[in-house]
Image: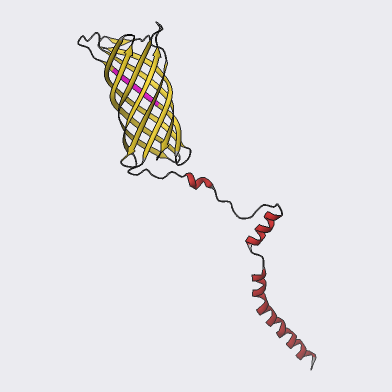
């Protein structure tokens, strides 16, 4: 056999080997899982991307039937009293307050519920003023990422006690808050409440309208 024939035969065998052997080389390479297992066994870091748990706490839009329960506590600041004769300073000191409320959502934003609370405030004469409000709560809420901004108006009654005197009357309490959603079940935030407490009497000079500001830290349970 001539040298030329031998070279042609050798070239043909090489081409056949490459054609049938190249796919085998591809499939013979180690898979990413094998490499990762080897790295983990040797104490190295895995090349598999780690998925974030952030998706587990993404806040879904509220829907009908969602509910929240809130507990809040903080100081109650007396602002002023007024009547037909003008504004009157109070002899009441900053006190403490707390309340519970429940909210049922009819739409992603609108809710209806109830609230009950209580407060105590000292006076200059070392006496105590007690307020026990309760009522219907109407709410509207905005959401931005993990922050929630509930607005509400509570309409109800309040027992007012001072020394041996008592009065039961209307209370209107508009409020605004901001909550941060810690996880799907809990959120925590800050509330600001304005208490408007009228005391009506037959003599206009005795009629008074009390105004208080409540600043509370709240925890809200979602279910």
Residue 101 in picture, x, y percent from top left? 36, 30
Residue 191 in picture, x, y percent from top left? 41, 28
Answer above or below: position of 18 versus 150. below
Answer above or below: position of 162 versus 136. above
Q: How is the image coloured?
A: secondary structure
| Residue located 22% across and 10% down the image | 204
Pick the quarter of the image with the C terminus.
top left
| Total count of labels | 0
Asked whether 193 falls inside the magenta stretch, the response is: yes
Residue 160 in picture, x, y percent from top left? 31, 16
Pick the quarter of the image with the N terminus.
bottom right
In the image: residue 125, left or right of residue 10: left
Give the prevailing secondary structure in the magenta stretch: strand
Answer above or below: position of 114 versus 20. above
Splitting the image into 4 quarters, where does residue 196 fall?
top left
| Residue located 40% across and 32% down the image | 70
Answer above or below: position of 16 versus 222. below
Q: Residue furthest front?
A: 164
Q: Which residues are magenta?
A: 192-197
Q: Residue furthest top?
A: 125
Residue 26 in picture, x, y percent from top left? 65, 70
Asked whether 163 falls inside the magenta stretch, the response is: no
Q: Residue furthest bottom?
A: 1
Q: Nearer the viewer, residue 100 or 152?
A: 100
């Amino acid at each position: 056999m001539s040298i030329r024939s031998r070279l042609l035969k050798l070239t043909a065998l090489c081409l056949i080997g490459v054609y049938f052997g190249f796919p085998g080389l591809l499939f013979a390479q180690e898979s990413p899982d094998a490499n990762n297992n080897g790295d983990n066994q040797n104490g190295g870091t895995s090349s598999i991307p780690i998925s974030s748990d952030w998706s587990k706490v993404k806040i879904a839009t509220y829907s009908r039937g969602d509910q929240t329960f809130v507990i809040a506590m903080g100081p109650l600041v007396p602002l002023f009293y007024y009547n037909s004769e003008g504004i009157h300073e109070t002899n009441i000191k900053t006190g403490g307050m707390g309340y519970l409320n429940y909210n049922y959502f009819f739409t992603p934003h609108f809710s209806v519920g109830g609230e009950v609370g209580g407060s105590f405030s000292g006076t200059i004469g070392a006496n105590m003023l007690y307020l026990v409000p309760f009522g219907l709560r109407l709410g509207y809420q905005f959401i931005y990422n993990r922050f929630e901004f509930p607005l509400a108006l509570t309409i109800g009654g309040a027992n007012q006690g001072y020394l041996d005197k008592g009065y039961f009357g209307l209370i209107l309490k508009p409020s605004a808050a901001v909550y941060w959603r810690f996880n799907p079940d809990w959120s925590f935030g800050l509330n600001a409440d304005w208490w408007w407490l009228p005391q009506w009497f037959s003599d206009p000079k005795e009629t008074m309208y009390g105004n208080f500001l409540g600043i509370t830290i709240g925890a809200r349970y979602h279910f």
